[in-house]
Structure formats: structure tokens, C-alpha cells
Amino acid sequence: MIGLAVADMAASLAFYRRLGLDLPAAADAEPHTEVVLPGGLRLAWDTVVTVRSIDPRWVPATGTRVSLAFDCGAPDGVDTVFAELTEAGYEGHLKPWDAFWGQRYAVVHDPDGNAVDLFAASAPSDS
């Protein structure tokens, strides 16, 4: 399981719903929620209050050390998802580009500043 500590559960879940995760509306008011991803990996959210109830000395990390990555299906999907997220007010960190490793790539930040990568395999060349 990958766990995220969040300042505002509803704001964080709204962001991840836009990326296609099926999170019930009732989870917005919960101190902890999780979703099972394809393959069985779980992604979980805990409010900062919940985390501090377990570890009173917990402090949020500075900078990005881990990023989540979402496959947007096709190169134009990266552009579309990036545009939808940034138009909704989320921070676009790196605009879509064609990466040398053969993917269309972009990076946005979730409401807590976590890097979220958007990617898709580049379209095959006509050569």
C-alpha cells in the first residue's frame, strides 16, 4: 500500500477522482480511505490529524521524494488530462513534452504538493 497524508481529504480525493480513481463521495469526510488499484496495490489517504494521532512528532516532508504516475492511454491523453487539471486550478509543474525515453510526459501537483506524473507511450514514427 502507498499512503498519502493530506491536509484536506475532500480536496485530495477530488483531484484523484479526476484521474479516474473510483472513490465514494462519503470518503470525503473520513479520516482514512483507500482504493484497490488494478493488480491489487492499494492507495490510501490519511488526514494529517489522523497521522499525528498516531505519531505526534510527524511533520510533512519538504520537496518531492515520491511521485505517482498515471497512464493516460495515448499521447493526446497526456495533453488532455494536463489541460483539464490545470484548468481546474491544479498546479501544472511540467507541461507535456515528448520525452527521450519514448513517452509523452507531464507533471502536475496534487493539492498537497505531491508530484503526479502523466504519461503515455509516444506515437510510433512513420519512418
Image (cartoon, rainbow, N blue to C red):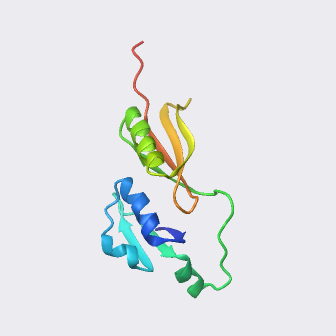
Residue located 56% across and 58% down the image: 114
> Percent x, y for residue 42?
41, 66
Q: Is residue 113 above or below residue 48?
A: above
> Percent x, y for residue 122?
43, 30
- In the image, 100 versus 93, the foreground residue is 93
Q: Quadrant of the C terminus?
A: top left
Q: How many numbered discs, if any?
A: 0
Residue located 36% across and 74% down the image: 27
Residue located 36% across and 67% down the image: 35
Residue located 65% across and 70% down the image: 60
Q: Is residue 100 above or below residue 116?
A: above
Does residue 28 appear to the left or right of 113 in the view shown?
Answer: left
> Percent x, y for residue 79?
43, 36
Q: Is residue 118 above or below residue 61?
A: above
> Percent x, y for residue 16?
41, 59
Instruction: Tell which residue pokes out farthest to the top in this image.
Output: 127
Q: Is residue 6 above or below residue 52?
A: above
- In the image, 28 versus 33, the foreground residue is 28
Does residue 54 appear to the left or right of 71 in the view shown?
Answer: right
